[in-house]
Amino acid sequence: MSSGLRARTRLALAACLGLVLMLEAPSAVRAQLDARSVLMQMILQLQTGTPNPTWYGAQLWQTMAVQTRGTGIYIPLVQLGRVQSVTINEELPLPTGNLYSMTANHQNGTSTWLLGISSITWRIEYADFLVGAAPQALPQPAPLPPPRQRTPSPEPPANPSPMPAPGPDSPSPACKKFPNLC
């Protein structure tokens, strides 16, 4: 085997191995998602003005930029001080991710959060916080309607009557052209 062929074979094998590792690693990381550590890091980012754009959905990123006037710093979070602990109060699994109600205990008080993390993008798509408030309750999903009972449809008449033509007072040209639709 020539050295050029060996090099190409090694490169192809390395590329395949790299692809397998890239596909496997995120699923392991995703399975270990701890919303508490995500919130702790998010608060630190918003206290220091270093939000990581890869962590946030586009709409949330824009909202944060507007609310902080482009600084990435939320003054109320800075005033609360370093986060000491985070508690998950409730978790609501949704079709495309999870919604969390959490409480962060800081050096100088508490902040309560609603945080939505997408299982599709693995980004924070929704965030809302209050300072010094009671834990925020998650909205409860609407109950599913009971299954509809199927009723047998009546037999159609043997000779169905034709659709009546629009009356003389019908001003619509569309009804004149397509009377079966009116």
Image: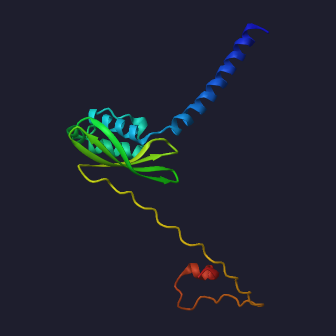
Question: For residue 180, which quarter of the picture?
Answer: bottom right
Outermost residue to the top: 3
x then y, percent, for residue 177: 62, 79
Quadrant housing the C terminus: bottom right
Q: Nearer the viewer, residue 65 or 90?
A: 90
Residue at x 42% of width, y 62% of height: 140
Quarter location, residue 136: bottom left
Q: Quadrant of residue 124?
A: top left
Q: Position of residue 46 (x, y in %)?
A: 30, 37
Question: Where is residue 102 drawn, in percent x and y?
Answer: 35, 48
Name the side, left or right, on which 114 lies relative to 173: left
Residue 56 image position (x, y, % from top left): 41, 41
Pick the front one: 61 or 170: 61
Q: Decide which of 89, 176 is in the foreground and name it.
A: 89
Identity of the residue drawn at 74% across and 90% down: 157
Q: Residue at x 62, y 82 (%)?
A: 179
Q: Indicate the colouring scheme.
A: rainbow
